[in-house]
Amino acid sequence: MTVDPATNVDVVVIGAGQAGLSAAYHLRRRGFAPYRDFVVLDADRAPGGAWAHRSPSLRMATVNGFHDLPDFELPAPDPTAPAREVVPGYFAAYEARQALPVVRPARVTAVRDSGERLLVESTAGRWATRALINATGTWTRPFLPHYPGHFAGRQLHYADYRGPAEFAGKRVVVVGGGASAIQLLSELGEVAETIWVTRRQPEFREGPFTPEAGRAAVALVEQRVARGLPVRSVVSVTGLGPSVALRRAEELGVLGRRPMFDRLTERGVAWGEVEEPVDAIIWATGFRPEVGHLAPLGLREPGGGIRMAGTQAAADPRVHLVGYGPSASTIGANRAGRAAVNGIVRLLGVPEPALLP
């Protein structure tokens, strides 16, 4: 059996979402030549990252915060335009404007230690790299918790939700206490009877989200990844802030939260002996980081997470994770992309070139 030879580069970026594009931008600004010195491997066939897979019903007016990529402002969109069209179009324009070396479709199957370099294996070939920026996000790993019992109706994760029309006239349980659950309630409440359940009492944040509050929330998540514990999202520690979706859900009167049910039944869900018949359950229960391809490197700690020092994996200084833990937001991804590139420049001993125009 013959194996295709690996292409040598200085840096491989895995993922072309917000974090990956930000990292690629900063690599180019620091003098790394596209394709010769670095590449971006993206599993999708077209630009857009996770945004390309969002529900068609998610409009720009109800997007829960979006920050521009470096050095290119998102043109003011129509608030009623689908986010899954606007953001991928913006990402495509960004890739072209910055002349970024995105290879797609290129799904990375494994990253291995081959001595001085890391060997990146993908469906589009192999690259031997001196450093790696992992920006694979979480969208491809929806989390579905296990509850005892069996439900004969329809169950789906938020990742598979495609709008409220198919649930018209139904009774629907929405599980989860984050922004995704609020979006679901604000849409389903127009056409269906909803039951909202969460494990913990939701925390509603009044007023603007200040920079100080943001830094405090990020610090809490950083403490977990620094200890090698499983990642919690920044949103999980900030509470639910004011939004278009939240206001609409309030108007519809669908925020009457119930505690988590005990079990599933054939016809619905149950708390003790009290059963609620329902037609569907939508799990807005979040996502987990997509890092399975890094398993050969043995980065995970006994606590289950990857211990981090900033964006750097503590177990291997050649590996940086962006869009992971405290940087799992659009503004956090931008900052993490820059920080990862700064770390790689120091690691590789790259001289400081004049910045590209």
Image (cartoon, rainbow, N blue to C red):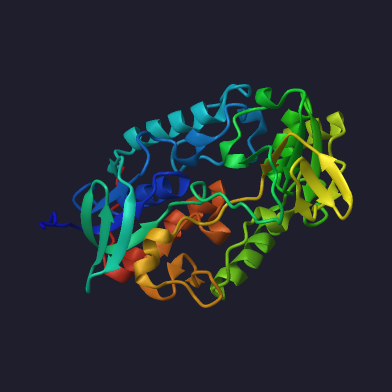
Closer to the camera in the image, 20 or 211? 20
Image quadrant containing the C terminus? top left
Instruction: Indicate the position of residue 182 as horizontal and vertical percent values.
Output: 74, 40
In this rendering, does residue 351 appear at all? no
Q: Is residue 76 left or right of residue 354?
A: right
Image quadrant containing the N terminus? bottom left
The quadrant in which residue 165 appears is: top right
The residue at the point 34 percent across, 34 percent down is: 97
In this rendering, does residue 55 appear at all? yes
Of all residues shown, which one is farthest toward the left?
2
Instruction: Indicate the position of residue 105 as horizontal and vertical percent values.
Output: 31, 40
The residue at the point 58 percent across, 31 percent down is: 55
The residue at the point 39 percent across, 44 percent down is: 16
Q: Is residue 132 left or right of residue 207?
A: left
The quadrant in which residue 42 appears is: top left
**Vertical side of 222 occupied by 202: above or below:** above
Total numbered labels: 0
Closer to the camera in the image, 3 or 344? 3
Q: Is residue 114 left or right of residue 143?
A: left
Instruction: Indicate the position of residue 218 as horizontal and vertical percent values.
Output: 63, 61
Instruction: Indicate the position of residue 192 as horizontal and vertical percent values.
Output: 78, 27
The residue at the point 57 percent across, 37 percent down is: 160
